[in-house]
Image (cartoon, helix red, strand yellow):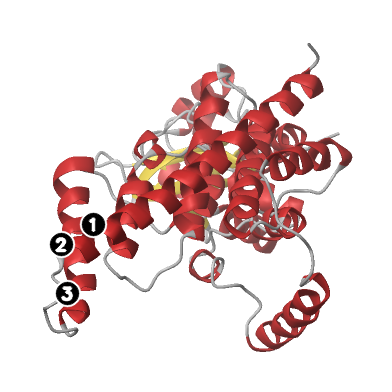
């Protein structure tokens, strides 16, 4: 079977699993509500219902802390975070944790919706299948989008709106390759009629205009956008954000001591292909750098080999990179400094260098990996 055929078949499975997740969550909530109403005596005062949401929250906290033993985040932002920072990988506990948490919270009267838990559960199954079949990054994200579309179609019985939601929120590229799986995943779920289609379009349009007037990001995107972790439809910006600074660090530079001489530098030059030499003291602190271009005029003056110290030749760069910087910051530093190599320093300690060429090569490779053709 071809890749496209396999992905198409898998999208149907993801749609079915997402629909089943929606059914399980809805029925779990209804069952919990029925049990709660049965347990609460009809002769009790109605004010007891004000305390039930608190009971549900306490039970949820206890289950999450002692049974699940993992953080259960808000459904849709958690999916966006996994796409932005974990290459679409979602922890396996999300296969069931949102079902349990939502049934207790909503079943006891908590004022929350079911779309978040449904999307979280559906996408967890999509991620699990992607891991099981070892799908590439672009196909993993497509499975998450299919799961999202299937879950939203099941919970709201609106397959077309579910596709729009997946494209807008998950930020997947709407190509021919991705459109068919999205359609199949959302249509796999049984949907209702379209009697309210036009009124909903009008309402949604006005809601969109009003919201975007005051904020460029939706409620699902706001937190990630504030932390600069949000992926958008700008593929160049997305790919740049996906690059990990620590994986770009090069450490094959010849390190010199500030007490070294010009002779030591010539020896390093003779067996090293780099034209940049970091100068590091005995504590591991970067105290300067020596560029080949700066010593080219004296490198063959043998009479200076033992008299000229590296400390006389080095300079301290004004720009450097911290391993915890994001790639947007790194790109800005390369652009503003005009340098081809920037030192990586953490708490004053020398780590290595990041080169403009390494960034560009990795960026181009990532572009190919995430693009649907």
Tell me how far mark 2 sits from mark 1, CA to CA. 6 Å
The quarter of the image holding the C terminus is top right
Image location (x, y in percent) of residue 152: 61, 54
Q: Secondary structure at mark 2?
A: helix
Judging by the rendered image, the residue that carries numbered circle 3 is 42
Q: Nearer the viewer, residue 331 or 263?
A: 331
The image shows residue 340, relative to residue 333, as above or below, that is above
Q: Is residue 246 left or right of residue 166?
A: left
Q: Secondary structure at mark 1?
A: helix
Q: Are marks 2 and 1 in contact (CB under 8 Å)?
A: yes
Q: Nearer the viewer, mark 3 or mark 2?
A: 3
Q: Residue furthest front?
A: 43
Q: Nearer the viewer, residue 24 or 311?
A: 24
Q: Is residue 343 left or right of residue 95?
A: right
Image location (x, y in percent) of residue 329: 57, 60
Q: Nearer the viewer, mark 3 or mark 1?
A: 3
Residue at x 38% of width, y 34% of height: 92
Residue 307 lies in what quarter of the image?
top left
Tell me how far mark 3 sits from mark 2, CA to CA. 9 Å
Judging by the rendered image, the residue that carries numbered circle 2 is 39
Judging by the rendered image, the residue that carries numbered circle 1 is 35
Q: Earlier in the sequence, mark 3 or mark 1?
A: 1
């Amino acid at each position: 079977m071809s890749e496209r055929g396999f992905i198409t078949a898998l999208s149907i499975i993801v749609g079915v699993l997402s629909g089943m997740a929606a059914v399980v969550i809805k029925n779990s909530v209804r069952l919990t509500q029925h049990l709660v109403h049965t347990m609460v005596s009809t002769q009790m005062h109605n004010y007891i219902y004000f305390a039930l949401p608190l009971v549900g929250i306490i039970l949820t906290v206890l289950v999450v802390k002692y049974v699940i033993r993992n953080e259960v985040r808000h459904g849709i932002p958690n999916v966006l975070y996994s796409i932005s920072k974990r290459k679409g990988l979602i922890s396996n506990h999300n296969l069931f944790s949102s079902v349990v948490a939502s049934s207790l919270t909503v079943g006891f009267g908590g004022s929350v919706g079911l779309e978040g838990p449904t999307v979280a559960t559906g996408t967890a199954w999509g991620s699990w299948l992607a891991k099981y079949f070892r799908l590439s990054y672009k196909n993993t994200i497509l499975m998450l989008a299919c799961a999202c579309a299937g879950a939203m179609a099941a919970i709201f019985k609106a397959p077309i709106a579910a596709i729009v939601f997946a494209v807008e929120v998950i930020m997947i590229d709407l190509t021919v390759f991705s459109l068919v799986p999205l359609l199949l995943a959302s249509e796999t779920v049984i949907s209702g009629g379209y009697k309210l289609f036009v009124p909903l379009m009008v309402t949604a349009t006005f809601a969109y205009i009003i919201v975007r007037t005051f904020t460029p990001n939706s409620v699902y995107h706001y937190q990630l956008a504030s932390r600069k972790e949000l992926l958008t439809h700008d593929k160049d910006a997305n790919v740049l954000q996906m690059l990990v600074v620590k994986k770009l660090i090069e450490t094959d530079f010849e390190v010199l001591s500030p007490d070294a001489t010009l002779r030591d530098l010539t020896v390093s030059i003779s067996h090293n292909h780099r034209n940049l030499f970091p100068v590091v003291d005995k504590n591991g602190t970067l105290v300067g750098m020596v560029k080949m271009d700066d010593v080219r005029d004296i490198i063959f003056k043998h009479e200076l080999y033992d008299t000229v110290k590296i400390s006389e030749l080095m300079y301290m760069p004004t720009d450097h990179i911290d391993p915890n910087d994001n790639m947007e910051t790194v790109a800005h530093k390369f652009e503003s400094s005009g340098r081809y190599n920037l030192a990586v320093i953490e708490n004053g300690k020398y780590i290595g260098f990041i080169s403009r060429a390494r960034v560009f090569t990795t960026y181009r490779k990532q572009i190919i990996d995430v693009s649907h053709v």
